[in-house]
Image: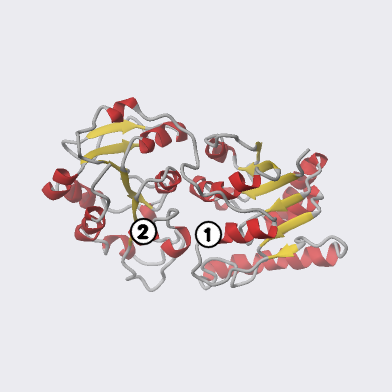
Amino acid sequence: MKPRLLVVELHHLGDAVMGLPFVRGAQQKFDVHVLCRPATTAIYRLLATPPHLHKWDPPWSEDRECGAMATIGAAQAEGRKLSAIAFDTAACVWADARAEIVMAETGAKHRIGFPMTRANYYAADLPWRTKRLWAGRLLEKLWSLTHPAKPLLTTWLHRENASQSHLRCWEQIAKAAGISCDDSVPWIKTELSPQIEALRVAGKPLLAVHMHARLPSKQWPFEKWKELLANSALRDRFTIFEILPDAGKTCAEGIASVATPDVSSLASALAASDAVLCHDSLPGHLAAALGKPVVTIFGSGEPDWFAPWDNRERAVQRRVCPMHPCIDRCGMDSYLCLSAVTVDDVLGALMKLPATR
């Protein structure tokens, strides 16, 4: 019987995709379990062999207020609930004392993670991030005082430099666990969308565009999208189709569209494409997981950290805001980072994409 490994991933869908090479590599040595938010289970089910999934919506999700004692109590309760599984190893890629408490309470012998130091914490210089960092360090301190015989982590990792990719952090965890990440593409299994396959024109690559984002701080203005997609050179180079999150109206005239109301249909649409244009969001990470070239428009995020796998050089961004990266909490009067990205910036990146299917 393989030893059991718990992966704690309580962030969003795109973040879960970035951890799939670790999960795939870990499955060679471990019986892998994942603790994640309910919506995120759809990501792990795309794997050829999905791990065991444990759903949990933490009380602090989506920035809900949760006091220190309530936070500790919730994390302890969830960890204790999982303790019956008898994990050998637990790991979390985020510098987060709450996840550390969960791992400690599972009783896993080996607990691998990044303690809450400034060097490990993304955007630690932002005032609201500094506040969260100190709150997390307080939780770590409280735990060490009340549980001196049970350290939160048994293996402490540290980012090698402040600009390293989130994927590199997963590689550090893999090394500590005695495994290798499996980033051979495709990472996920999905069927090609027949609706999109029917759009193919001989010798002309299919470009998928996804114009929507979960947060306004990631949304490039629709007026610029329309100008870009009306460009004759772009239309001559690619057959373009738009991916819609639902059955809503297309934002661009004269191009086909397909509705993708769930993660599975989104993956199917991306699999049928030859290249993808999107925001700093889930579609970019899913496309990269399928081995597609991805042009990503970045706003509030940091591409050095969160660009889709193997597509950092295709990230389009203008570093004009003094508060960048704000991590989705804009402190300016408008989204300077997004309005500064020009149509020519994005067009230039697209025209450098491979010309063949």
Residue with the mark numbered 1: 166
Q: Circle 2 is placed at which residue position?
A: 298
The colour scheme used to paint the residues is: secondary structure
Q: Position of residue 234 (x, y in %)?
A: 17, 48
Q: Is residue 177 left or right of residue 220?
A: right
Which quadrant of the figure has residue 266?
A: top left
Q: Which mark is first along the chain, 2 or 1?
A: 1
**Classed neighbour count for the residue bearing mark 1: other residues with Cα under 10 Å, few (<14), some (14–19), many (≥20):** many
Residue 79 position, x and y percent, is 76, 47
> As displayed, is residue 134 above or below residue 186?
below
Query: Is residue 102 something that shows in the picture?
Result: no
Q: Nearer the viewer, residue 64 or 34?
A: 34
Q: Quadrant of the N terminus?
A: top right
Q: How many marks?
A: 2
Q: Is residue 316 above or below residue 53?
A: below
Q: Which one is in front, 310 or 39?
A: 310
Does 11 sit left or right of 319 as displayed?
right
